[in-house]
Image (tube, rainbow, N blue to C red):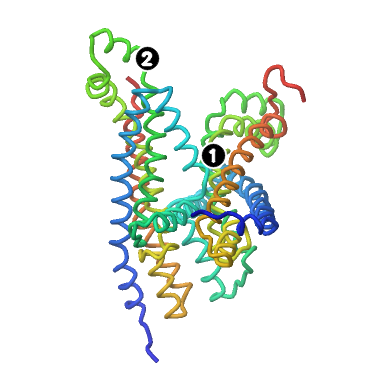
Amino acid sequence: MLEFSDVLAAWPLFLDGLAFTVFLTLVSCTLGTLLGIACAGARLHGGPITRGIVACYVEFFRNTPFLAQIFFIFFGLPSVGVKLDSTSAALLSLTLNLGAYACEIVRAGIEATPHGQIEAAESLALSPWQIFSRVVVPPALGRIWPGLTSQLVIMMLASALCSQISTAELSYVANFIAGKTFRNFESYIVVTIIYLALAIALRALLAWLGPRFIFGRLPAGALK
Amino acid sequence: MNAFSNWDIIRNLLLAVPWTLALSAIAFIGGSVLAVTMLVLRLWKPATLGRAVHWYVQLFQGTPLLMQLFLTYFGLALFGVDTTPLAAATVCLILYACAYLTETWHGCVISIPPGQWEASASLALNLREQLVHVIFPQTFRMAVPPTVGLLVQIIKNSSLASVVGFVELTRAGQMIANVTYAPFLVYGLVSLIYFAICFPCSLLGRRLERRTRIQY
């Protein structure tokens, strides 16, 4: 009934799609997190106009579906002159979407900063930028790291939607193989298993990365 | 050559909105019923059924909804069930909503102090009476804000039903954009309509969160 031989014979294509998904995820997660931190800083320390613009951006991207955002950026923007190829459109949508969610998550972490930290930093004559980048943000990231990890995994899974604008990532390859071999169910099962493995791997990677490189707190007894 | 006015576009998009709302409502209600069942099973036999529910949640939270939809659509057809896009989308979204809802509600239940469980057990209440009279009334208040957030998430994820051919707001937008060659206007309107549906729910969730933050 279920025949995997045709589907598994196309394993190089699955690898290509996997590589592209990993590329999309890494680039958009990095840029999106940076954008989120910047927006959180703007929302907390900016003037009223800046705060209003960031609030509109965050609320718009958190209350509209990712599919509608992708379609608008890829199909709608060329009408006003901004023509993007599918990879750029996918990266832009993923980054903007993640930036909105990351802004809220990071803002929660920043607002939980004990005020004594900032007072101590000011008494050491650090500039506001130094205080933000060295004293406030790293511990804030440490506080919200589980929530941010979940959001990054959600973004990795959301990159599957980029197949709808013909970005050649893993879901696009699944559709392609399904169309070629007429083995729809088997193709999607293989890709689902790959996504599940990717989600587990991404979680493990972020759990390993965070304490070592982002917020500088090694677990007790761990080797570097 | 027919020219489509803006009113034609808006009117036809609004005609698709009830389908989005209906799909979201069915997914949320069906998911809630299934989620409560799974929650009770998880509390009744944590070692066996609880672990099974945990793996179910990990599966649905660790795979893209797009793949889940495709698997449901083609999988149901493979096993002989006549699948309309509505049926496949409904089944998949119910399972998806159930995974997130049961995980959220389980988190609320395990944050109830253990003393509540011990006190109710010492009053010779069985599990059903414990849940109905002691645990769930306290959990309900705590669970409303994240559940409203999940409702917004379900409304947004109903847009994916368009990829299996179910005609809701996003699919209607695609069809209208193809006919009118005005994707900027059409997809912009689609986004604004989704925003108009989801933003009040988000605000409601935030207001409920502020109100239920009272510590007791």
Find residue B73 and report its horizontal and vertical position in percent.
42, 57
Q: Subunit of mark 1?
A: A
Residue A157 against residue B86 in the figure, above or below: above
Residue A62 against residue B147 in the figure, above or below: below
Q: Secondary structure at mark 1?
A: helix
Residue at (46% x, 51% y) in the render:
B68
Quarter of the figure with the C terminus of chain B = top left
Q: Amino acid at mark 1?
A: Ser
Which residue in the structure is indicated by mark 1? A150
- Picture quadrant where residue A90 is located: bottom right
Q: Is residue A206 left or right of residue A151?
A: right
Residue B114, numbered label = 2
Residue A128 against residue B20 in the figure, above or below: above
- Picture quadrant where residue B121 is located: top left
Find residue B151 and report its horizontal and vertical position in percent.
35, 46
User: How many residues crowd around disc 2 within 10 Å: few (fewer than 14), some, or many (20 or more)?
Assistant: few
Residue at (57% x, 46% y) in the render:
A193
Residue at (22% x, 20% y) in the render:
B129
Q: Is residue B177 left or right of residue A210?
A: left
> Going by the picture, which residue comes out furthest to the front?
A1
Residues A173 and A87: in front is: A173
Q: Amino acid at mark 2?
A: Pro
Total numbered labels = 2
Residues A186 and A130: in front is: A186
Residue B141 against residue A87 in the figure, above or below: above
Quarter of the figure with the N terminus of chain B = bottom left
